[in-house]
Image (tube, rainbow, N blue to C red):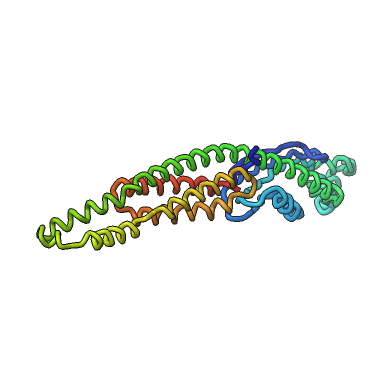
Amino acid sequence: MAAPLSSMTGFARCSGTLPDGAAYVWELRSVNGRGLDLRLRLPPGLDALETPLKEAASRAMKRGNIQAALTLRTETRPVSAPDPAVIERYLALAQELAARIPGAPPPRAETLLSLPGVFRAEAAEPDEAQTQARVTALAKAFDEAIVALVAARRGEGEKLRAILGTLLDEIAALRDDAAREAAGQPAAQRARFEESLAQLLHPEARARIPEERLAQEVALLAAKSDVREELDRLSAHLDAARALLAEGEGAGRKLDFLTQEFVREANTLCSKSASVALTRTGLALKAAIERLKEQAANVE
């Protein structure tokens, strides 16, 4: 049974509530990348999360550009404290008015404290233990999101395995077509060579050319257009690519390098082609290999 194959494309979302009542949402998006690059978008005050999150990502994945965004919603209750300066101003004004009104009672404390602006909201001092508990809980939630992202990437990887397998079958069929067309190249070249001689030389001059010399010239042309090595290497590359797909995890880089070898052989085959049919097949082969290369770039 083939080992799991992972794509570098995936999405995961994880939400919940922290012990302190805050609601959180982790959203992770992954796309292709030469290496592993985790970019975090965190609310203020949670910089301590950066190092453990990067370590968690590197333990689970080897390649891909990953965007991780944390949304945090907290119900903060403002802490109110009396403002002495405002109270003093209210008290001075109340005493001044009481002095000007005969029989007026002195200002009462509860009345002063109920006036606008006496109490002002103050930010609660952060509790170190609560902050650490929040960081720990969010890091654990991130681990769950990473597990979901890995699962999503593997799901995409299995779809990718089927696509790559189909492309390899297409390339194998084109390789076989090229082999059949290449087998007829020597005879076609001899016929064209003899036709050219007939057009360029008088029949008597043509008759004086030894068959041995003619065979040598045809052999030279055949050697220049011999694509058997390219076809053999394409077969070897097809076997190697299928082995990598069966190998699964971590096959992406090797597939990247292998597709470059596919491209090289297809280019050489086209350059050696001595027939329209082989050139047409070579171009179709190059197109199929280019699609293989594009899809292989998604493998982790």
When asked about the image quadrant of residue 20, the answer is top right
Provide residue 88's location: percent of width, then percent of height. Answer: 84, 52
Q: Is residue 296 left or right of residue 213?
A: right
Q: Is residue 248 left or right of residue 119?
A: left
In what quadrant of the picture does the N terminus appear?
A: top right
User: Who is closer to the viewer here, 116 or 228?
Assistant: 228
When asked about the image quadrant of residue 208, the answer is bottom left
**Residue 96 seen:** no
When asked about the image quadrant of residue 79, the answer is top right
Provide residue 36's location: percent of width, then percent of height. Answer: 64, 54
**Residue 242 seen:** yes
Q: Is residue 258 left or right of residue 270?
A: right
User: Who is closer to the viewer here, 69 or 236?
Assistant: 236
Provide residue 41's location: percent of width, then percent of height. Answer: 66, 50
**Residue at horizontal 44%, vertical 56%?**
264
**Residue at horizontal 38%, vertical 43%?**
177
In this rendering, the count of numbered labels is: 0
User: Who is closer to the viewer here, 146 or 271?
Assistant: 271
User: Who is closer to the viewer here, 51 or 56?
Assistant: 56
Would you place residue 252 above or below residue 108 in this image? below
Provide residue 12's location: percent of width, then percent of height. Answer: 65, 39
